[in-house]
Image (cartoon, rainbow, N blue to C red):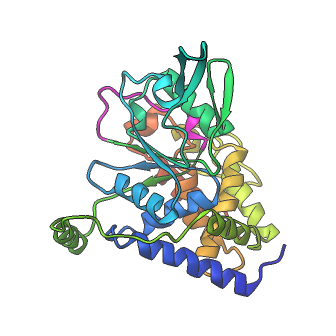
Amino acid sequence: MNADPGMTREAAALAKRARDEMGLRLVGRDELSRGILTGILAGGHVLLEGVPGLAKTLAVRTFADISGLSFSRIQFTPDLLPADITGALIWEQNTGRFLARRGPLFANIVLADEVNRAPAKVQSALLEAMEEGQVTIGEESLRLPEPFFVMATQNPIEHEGTYPLPEAELDRFVLKLLIDYPAENEEEEIVRRSAATRQAPVGKILGPEEIAFLRSSVDAVRLDDAILRYIVRLVRASRPGREQSGQHVKDLSRYVEFGASPRASIHLSRCARIAALLDGRDHVLPDDVKAMARPVLRHRLVMSYQAEADSVSADAVIARLLSSISLP
């Protein structure tokens, strides 16, 4: 399907209105708003990482408010049980049978706060919800609402009482966004706004119909074959010992144990289309791919102990990949 220039402009303007509306509550967080919107349009889940107090929870709540979708927040703790998030079977004495009581996962947008605090059984239940769009209560599998998005947060500096997220679960997140401290002038504005007695009201900009329209607009964005090959080469080059087409990344095998899977190629191509649409273009440029490479790939690279010893991050490896793979 070829993009209609008018459709592209309308979709970009709608997305801009949504980000502007979020800006009524969020100061200097346009990239965060853009990242959350990208995850929604990609039809996937988003992992937000940053120290406490950087408006991660506020950003997710605000998006839920401007979308009008149902919202649920789950505070993950080490003593959480799968039934605490999925629901449980309750005995109903009047009917003499068990009924499924649905848990907080049954919402369009689920905020999984401090997701890395939950033990393995809870992570397994969450993985089923993220991958299959359903949960199992007793012997019954129940479909989750459509659309269904998990917005998970984790604190990178606190390790006591936390569990590393399994790679299979990490791979289900379309994006991992790193949230940094605000600039000085932005922090001044945050303090000013904190004196208000209540949060700024926001309007409903993105209902289910608007989200469906934006997704169809993304489908119409043109991805040239040369750009597609660039995406595949970039992802394949992240796999140690599997350099393709003579592409070589120095020290990759030393710092990366396992690279990104083909799911990363799919998500990177989709997110590059979204980046083009949000900028008002009906075609993908190499810069769109480069802009989305870090959030799409950083949580999919399994780094080695040597990388930790040498303080080499996944973002540093991705930077090397981007500088090593020739542009189309």
User: Which of the image's four quarters has the C terminus?
Assistant: bottom right
243 or 11: nearer the eye? 11
In the visual, does 170 lie left or right of 152? right
308 or 26: nearer the eye? 26
Residue with the most extreme bottom position: 6
Whether the magenta-drawn stretch holds residue 164 is answered as: yes
Residue at 71% over, 82% down: 7
How many discs mark residues in the rendered view? 0
273 or 286: nearer the eye? 273
Residue with the most extreme right position: 1
- Residue 173 place in picture, x, y as percent: 57, 46
Residue 154 quadrant: top left
Residue 106 vs 193, above or below: the answer is above
Residue 256 vs 266, above or below: the answer is above
Residue with the most extreme front position: 94
Residue 39 quadrant: bottom right
Residue 323 seen in the figure: no
Magenta span: chief secondary structure: loop
Residue at 62% over, 45% down: 145
226 or 128: nearer the eye? 128
Residue 18 seen in the figure: yes
- Residue 80 place in picture, x, y as percent: 40, 24
- Residue 289 place in picture, x, y as percent: 63, 65
User: Which of the image's four quarters has the N terminus?
Assistant: bottom right
Residue at 79% over, 69% down: 226
Whether the magenta-drawn stretch holds residue 174 is answered as: no
Residues in magenta, as a range: 157-172
Residue 227 vs 234, above or below: the answer is below
- Residue 35 place in picture, x, y as percent: 50, 62
